Amino acid sequence: MKQTLLALALAAALPLTTFAATYDDLINSAKMGDTSDIAKMVQRGASVDTTDREGNTLLMLAARDGHTDLMEFLIKQRAKVNARNAAGDTALRLAAFRGHLKASELLVANGAEVNMSGWTPLSYAAFNGHADIARLLVKSGADVNAATENGTTALIVAAKGGHIEIVKFLLANRADPNKRLESGETAMDIALKNQNTDIADLLLRAGGKSGKSVTIEIR
């Protein structure tokens, strides 16, 4: 009787062990860009939209590290291009943040949204100074004046980071230099705060102003 119960317990445990091993292998293979292993596991029934513990899909993991071959395979298998992880990021956001141009191009070509609430892919690209991706996104219809709830725009983050090439590009594409943060600060204020005087001068020439109010005390 005891042997029978033990055998049943072991039999019940094996599928869970196998599932855990398959899940870990799937996630690790996605991080490594191993298309061959992923294809084998998908053929055995693994979902192309499997997520890790942070909600990143296999496509997000591949996009984050620029594994375009794996991305192509997953997209052909109808992976969800606009899925979001626990932080609200999409595959395109992650690719833009990391500076993977080919991955970003692939996603845009397959229906990835360039405009969304919160931080946009354009703002992510601007934050890290990826001008080539910024150009791609604007060409694909990205709103250059899109802002987060606290007013952060691509121009403001580019001014903060000292990314003058992106600042020039955004201004040339009608970015508003006078959009304000909740604090009232504009891109010029942020540039000056971060000692990016060349960018502040550029913004001033483009019609930018300080959003700070000056109080004069009269005695």
Image: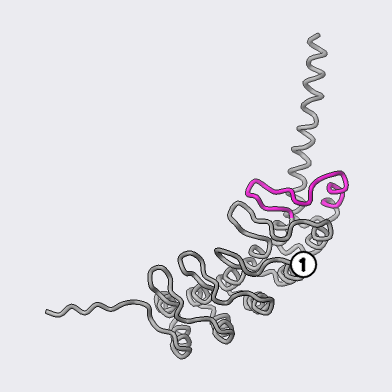
Question: Would you say 135 lies left or right of 155 here?
Answer: right
When the figure is inspected, residue 14 is found, relative to residue 108, above or below; the finding is above
When the figure is inspected, residue 35 is found, relative to residue 106, above or below; the finding is above
Q: What stretch is highlighted in magenta?
A: 38-58
Residue at 67% across / 65% down in the picture?
Answer: 92
Front-most of residues 19 and 196: 19
Residue 216 placement: quadrant: bottom left
Q: Report which residue position mark 1 lands on.
A: 110
Residue at 82% across / 13% down in the picture?
Answer: 4
Front-most of residues 198 and 109: 109
Residue at 45% across / 65% down in the picture?
Answer: 150
When the figure is inspected, residue 109 is found, relative to residue 85, above or below; the finding is below
Residue 122 placement: quadrant: bottom right
Q: Which residue lies furthest to the bottom in this view?
A: 205
Position of the C terminus, as image quadrant, is bottom left
* Residue 3 placement (x, y as % from top left): 81, 12
Residue at 85% across / 52% down in the picture?
Answer: 39
Q: Which amino acid does label 1 sit on?
A: Asn
Front-most of residues 73 and 215: 215
Mark 1 residue element = loop
Crowd tier of the residue under label 1, counting other residues whose Cα lies within 10 Å: few below 14, some 14–19, many 20 or above: some
* Residue 1 placement (x, y as % from top left): 81, 8
* Residue 24 placement (x, y as % from top left): 74, 43
Principal secondary structure, stretch drawn in magenta: loop
* Residue 211 placement (x, y as % from top left): 37, 78
Residue 74 placement: quadrant: bottom right
* Residue 45 covered by magenta stretch: yes
* Residue 40 covered by magenta stretch: yes
